[in-house]
Amino acid sequence: MLVLSLAGQTLPKQKVLNFVNPGNRRLLKTANGNFYFFRSLPEKSMSLDVKGLDKIQLRSFAIESLKKPQVVITINKKSVTYDLALAEKLNGFDLYQPLELTIPDNTETITVLCYSRSVYFRAFYTIKPKPKAKVKLPSLQLVEHAGMIKIERDSKASDYYSFTPQQELRFNLNNNRKADVYVRARLLDATIPVFELYYKGKLINTYDFTIKRTTQYKATGVTSLSIGKKITLDMGNGEYVLKAKSNHMFFARPVVLKK
C-alpha cells in the first residue's frame, strides 16, 4: 500500500475508468480519495472501454526510478509510444504527469501496454455536465394587476383581475397559445368607460363600453357592472397590457384557449 499525495493531478468532476483486464494492483491514497492503480500481466496489454468518450486521462507512477519510462497506446489498431514525464518525486516514488488522450469517434476500446513492471496506471474521464432542464413557462403568466375579484353568474364564480388609471393589467402569453380576455367595467355615471390594449408595447386597439348594465353578472361591492366585451388575443407570445383611459375600474379575465 502506498500513501502518496497527488495534489494537482486530481481534477474536479472526474470519474475512474476501470481496466477491462487488469493485472496486479496497488492502492494509492490521496487527499481526494483512494484509488487502485494497475499494471498488466508480463508483456500483456490492458484494455479500456471508451465507448461514448471523447477524452480520457491516464495517470501513472513508478515504484522505482526509470531511465526512459514509456507507455504504448493502441487506438483503432494504430499504436503510439508516449514518454512518461516526471512530475515529482515523493517518498522514493516517481509520479508522472497525466497523459491526455483524445478518443476518435466510434472508438469502443483502446489498449495500454507498458513493458516496465514498475509502473502502475489508472484512467479517468471527465463527467460531462448534464444539460439544464428547460423550464416550461406557464401559458398565462400574470405580471401585475390592481387586485382580484370574483364575478358570479348563476352561483358560479370566476376570478377577474382589475385595472385602473393608476394600475394597469399586464400578463404574458407563452407556449404559442392564444387567449380570450373578457372585460367589464364598473359604471359610475353616464361617462363611457374606455380602455386600451397593448402588445409588446405597441397600441393595438381602443375599446369603449355603453352604459348598459348587466343583470346576470354580480360582484361583491360593485353595484353597477357593465355588459362584457370579449377580445381574442392571437398576436402570439409576448406581453399584453390593458390600460384604463377613462376614470373607471375595469375587470378582466384572460382565458387560455385549447389548441
Image (tube, rainbow, N blue to C red):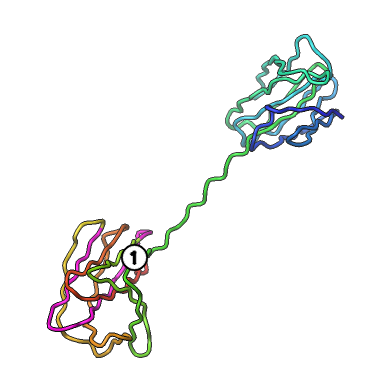
For the magenta stretch, what is the residue range?
174-199
Q: Percent from the top left, x then y, of residue 96?
A: 73, 20
Which of these two is toward me, 9 or 162?
A: 162
- Residue that label 1 marks: 144
| Membership of 247 in magenta stretch | no
Indicate the secondary structure of the residue bearing disc 1.
strand
State the quadrant of the N terminus. top right
Q: Amino acid at mark 1?
A: Glu
Q: Residue 208 sits in which quadrant?
A: bottom left
Is 258 on the left or on the right of 41, as rendered? left
Residue extending farthest to the top is 67
Is 39 on the left or on the right of 254, as rendered? right
Q: In percent of the image, x 64 and y 35: which residue is there?
A: 12
Q: In percent of the image, x 24 and y 76: which residue is there?
A: 249
Q: Residue 148 sits in which quadrant?
A: bottom left
Q: In percent of the image, x 20 and y 87: which residue is there?
A: 213
Q: Percent from the top left, x then y, of residue 161?
A: 32, 73
Q: Percent from the top left, x then y, of residue 22?
A: 81, 30
| Membership of 188 in magenta stretch | yes
